[in-house]
Amino acid sequence: MQYKHLFFDLDHTLWDFHNNQIKTLNDLFVSYKLDRYFQDFDDFFAQYMPINTHLWHEYQHGRIPKRDVKVGRFHQTFSKAGYDDIAMAESFADDFVSGNSLQTRVIPYAKEVLTYLKNKKYHLYIITNGFREAQHTKMERSGLTPFFERTFISEDIGASKPHRHFFEYAIKSANARKKESLVIGDSLENDIIGAREFGVDQVYFNPDKIAHTEKVSREISSLKELMDWL
């Protein structure tokens, strides 16, 4: 199969969201003096993550508005620790989104692989469910912007991955054909199943080699593996 159009997820696939968010949250934990409410940062993070994961899932399926994720994840975490202050949660949320987008750590081999693919004349695009106000800044600050022809953000499209409309919009807007397109991402639900059900081949980026039963076109544990066959 000769692919021409490569659609990359951003967070956790190219941009190192996990380590970047830990750095940002740790800084905010100190500046907001959250040790008044949590034993330590690890205690805060352990309570925050399941709330954040659940709210993102609800948002991506259109069941809650953006604000319920952006602010709600922190308001719920603080409230669980006995500190119910929506104004503080709003301030913390704004500081997190703006501060996190300034972080620059990328996934190992991301830039080497993108340079290789660009030199091979592939058309490269970003497909992301992340917040509009953060994604472009993340890409610019981390040096990813020059590699991509377009960035497709769910807020702009009006639908999130894994919904069919998201993939249909991105591929049509790129003037691409399904059989010449390939989606690369770390989320089985959003990237892999979404692309598969739309009829587009996929690469599941699974660095932790998590066991699963989904049928995928191809699976990799390092981005560097893309250079072995693309």
Image (tube, rainbow, N blue to C red):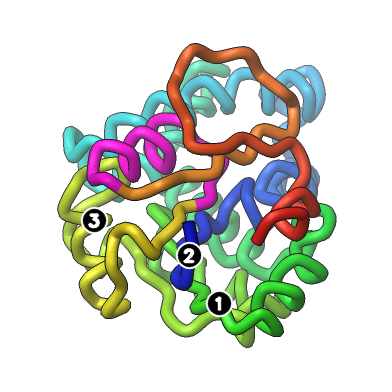
Q: Residue furthest front?
A: 1
What's the residue type where badge 3 is placed?
A: Phe
**In the displayed structure image, the side of residue 176 where residue 89 appears, left or right:** right
Q: Distance between the residues labelled 2 and 3?
A: 20 Å
Query: In this view of the protein, which residue sits in the foreground, 183 or 207?
Result: 183
Q: Position of residue 43 (x, y in %)?
A: 73, 19
* Residue visible at 80% across and 53% down in the picture: 224
Q: Quadrant of residue 63?
A: top left
| Quarter of the image that includes the C terminus | bottom right
What's the residue type where badge 1 is placed?
A: Tyr
Q: Mark 2 points at which residue?
A: 3
Q: Position of residue 86 (x, y in %)?
A: 39, 41
The mark closer to the camera, 1 or 2, is: 2
Q: Which of marks 1 and 2 is nearer the N terminus?
A: 2
Q: Which type of secondary structure does the marked residue at label 2 adopt?
A: loop
Question: Magenta segment range?
Answer: 184-199
Q: How far apart are marks 1 and 2 (CA)?
A: 8 Å
Q: Position of residue 217 (x, y in %)?
A: 49, 37
